[in-house]
Amino acid sequence: MRSHCPTNYAVEHFGDKWSLLIIRDLMFKGKRHYNEFFESGEKVSTSVLGDRLKNLEESGIISKGQDTVKKSRIKYSLTAKGIDMLPFMVDMISWSGKHDSETEAGDVFLAQAIDGREFLLKSIQEKLEKEHLMDS
């Protein structure tokens, strides 16, 4: 770690495009497996994807384990530390929705992120904890 400046701490743990997109996929798109991340629209290379998954795991933001359905497959989950990124991710989506006229964020989600932020955060957090923490 270069310094313990809060911004530097965050950037060193998840401060690149691909890491944030993996977190997005886990939080909002229900993706849990390597191939699902690889097939995302942003076209990450296999080496970058593998590296970012490893870094996120080493940072304690995600964990990996055996898939309960297909035992030979690895299933990735958000940790409590990863789920704690939810408010940041929602704020980032809101900011993008405000400034990107072609945003893919739905109008309902954006309205909830502004007018019903606490309820939205609570409902998503409960869902993520159930799916990622109780499942691991």
Image (spheres, grey):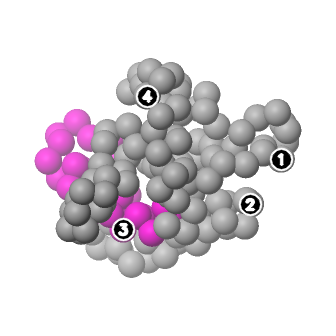
Marks 4 and 2 sit apart, C-alpha to C-alpha, by 27 Å
Q: Which residues are magenta?
A: 82-111
Q: Nearer the viewer, residue 27 or 50?
A: 50
**Residue at coordinates 31% horizontally, 57% vertically from top-left?**
1
Q: Is residue 39 left or right of residue 111?
A: right
Give the amino acid type for the residue marked by disc 4 in the picture. Answer: Val
What main secondary structure does the magenta stretch of the protein show? Answer: helix
Q: Position of residue 80 (x, y in %)?
A: 55, 68
Q: Position of residue 65 (x, y in %)?
A: 73, 48
Give the amino acid type for the residue marked by disc 3 in the picture. Answer: Pro
Q: Taking 35 as reference, is 94 above or below it?
A: below
Q: Taking 20 as reference, is 36 above or below it?
A: above
Which residue, given by chain and number where applicable, does mark 3 sit on? Answer: 87
- Which element carries disc 3, helix, strand or loop? helix
In the rendering, which numbered label is found on residue 48?
4
Q: Position of residue 6 (x, y in %)?
A: 24, 68
Give the amino acid type for the residue marked by disc 1 in the picture. Answer: Thr
Q: Position of residue 31 (x, y in %)?
A: 59, 42
Marks 1 and 2 sit apart, C-alpha to C-alpha, by 9 Å
Is mark 4 in CB contact (under 8 Å) with mark 1? no
Which residue, given by chain and number where applicable, does mark 2 sit on? Answer: 135
Q: Nearer the viewer, residue 135 or 57?
A: 57
**Residue at coordinates 35% horizontally, 73% vertically from top-left?**
117
In the rendering, which numbered label is found on residue 68?
1
Mark sitting earlier along the chain (2/3): 3
Mark sitting earlier along the chain (4/2): 4
Give the amino acid type for the residue marked by disc 2 in the picture. Answer: Asp
